[in-house]
Amino acid sequence: MTLELQARLNEVKGKIAAACTRAGRDPQEVRIIAVTKYVSLAATGQVLQQGLTDIGENRWQDAAAKWEAFGDRGTWHFIGHLQTNKVKDVVGRFAYIHSLDRLSLAKEIEKKAASLGMEMPCFIQLNVSGEETKYGLEPEALFDFVKEIREYRHIRIAGLMTMAPYETEPEQTRPVFRGLREWRDRLNREALLDYEVGHLSMGMSNDFEVAVEEGATWVRLGSILVGKE
């Protein structure tokens, strides 16, 4: 898999660079999260060997063995819907949570992070597309949500996250990604926090080039990069 993975990585980096050129951006602004949820322990090890040290997992049950084997070799991103009863497993192991979408979850994250004496960087997940099957806050609820959780001293809002609908024509996802960027910019203009929210976690295998053109700083790539087993 290693040579194939290297070829895929080179192709992905080339597409990111081209998208950045089109958008007048620096490719160094875009980081790749290798989504390993569908691949084995051994394949995850090969991903790390290629220098892809940002690892994305959706469920603690599936990630546990990989984290036990390679936890100190990568930066771990929890990118799936997080149940409150799994917070105790995720906080302290994962460097980022990309799916903060409700107050009950924020309270559990704050409680666990406080007990560990740490700050937990989180992305607020917005359901920009409005799909009923997608998790995430309604965008219009963002400001009130931030006002609620800004008192939590052990949570830091790293950015916003969204998932676009799967489209056969990736261009059709552009309004979703543009919308997330606009909400991020509005949040910063409102100055509800005493720091600037910088990151946008958006774009997956089918649509990451459009996401990069619209300002993505983290793209979450599974099948196009690490494949499936």
Image (cartoon, rainbow, N blue to C red):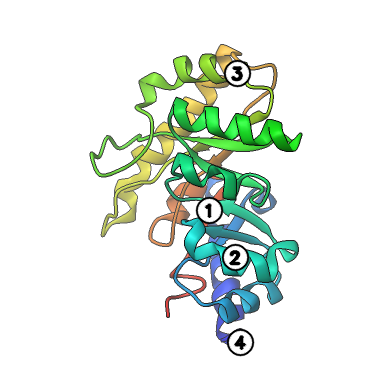
Q: Distance between the residues labelled 3 and 4?
A: 46 Å
Callouts 2 and 1 close, C-beta under 8 Å: no
What residue is shown at x 49% (from left), y 75% (from top)? 39
The local crowd at label 4, few if under 14, some if 14 to 19, many if 20 or more residues have their Cα within 10 Å, is few
For discs 3 and 4, the disc positioned in front in the rendered view: 3
Q: Do the residues labelled 2 and 3 touch (CB within 8 Å)?
A: no
Contact check, label 4 and label 2, Cβ < 8 Å: no
Query: Which amino acid, mark 4?
Result: Leu
Q: Name the residue under label 4.
A: 3
- Mark earlier in primary sequence (4, 2): 4
**Disc 2: which residue:** 13
Residue under pointer 1: 219
Q: Please tell me how many numbered marks the rendered image carries.
A: 4
Q: In this view, does 185 lie to the left or right of 205?
A: right
Classify 23 as above or below 41: above
- In the rendered structure, which disc, 3 or 1, sits on the residue that comes first in sequence? 3
Residue type (three-letter) at the residue carrying disc 1: Val
